[in-house]
Image (cartoon, grey):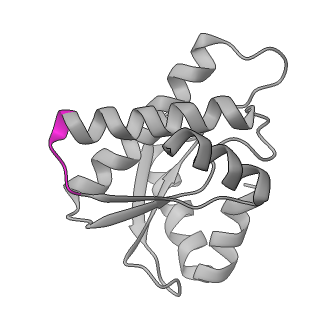
Amino acid sequence: MILKGVANCIHTYAGVQLRLTCAELMEAQGYEEPTGQAKITPAYNLPSKYVIHTVGPIVDGALTQAHRDLLASSYRACLDIAAENGCESIAFCCISTGVFGFPKRAAAEIAVQTVKDWKTEKNSAVKVIFNVFGDEDLAIYRRILQ
């Protein structure tokens, strides 16, 4: 398994234990994690209790409704696992917008709307933080959240 982008950073700084735990989960599961689902592991050396892992959609070509639906599913799956495990907060990177090629503006719109809908549906107090990569992402999220 080759990890790129944010996933690689998380695995690097969490320590080898996280890579081993993920490998054990995947071996026990018997297949790669499907897009739009999520798993939770301890965070090991990171300053959090857990890491919630999701596989976002890869956009190679035109953005489709299937891509949009899978991205929303990734966010919902993470939120569900966070709530199930008593997390008071969750920080999201810009899922799929790096090496996976999802257009940043569309991804941010989906992320924000999915979180709003989920929080309303679940009547949840889970604090959600959108952790952005750079100034462009920050400007996009600021415009959407105003």
The residue positioned 52% from the left and 83% from the top of the image is: 46
Q: On the rendered structure, is 98 left or right of 78?
A: right
Query: Is 143 or 68 nearer to us in this picture?
Result: 143
Q: On the rendered structure, is 20 left or right of 102?
A: left
The residue positioned 40% from the left and 48% from the top of the image is: 78
The residue positioned 55% from the left and 39% from the top of the image is: 144
Percent across and percent down for residue 90 are 39, 62
User: Is residue 56 depicted above or below 69 in this figure?
Assistant: below
Query: Is 112 or 36 nearer to us in this picture?
Result: 112
Boundaries of the magenta span: 121-125
Percent across and percent down for residue 62 are 80, 14
Q: On the rendered structure, is 1 left or right of 126?
A: right
Q: Quadrant of the N terminus?
A: bottom right
- Spot the residue most to the front: 146
Q: On the rendered structure, is 5 left or right of 74?
A: right
The residue positioned 46% from the left and 76% from the top of the image is: 43
- Magenta span contains residue 50: no
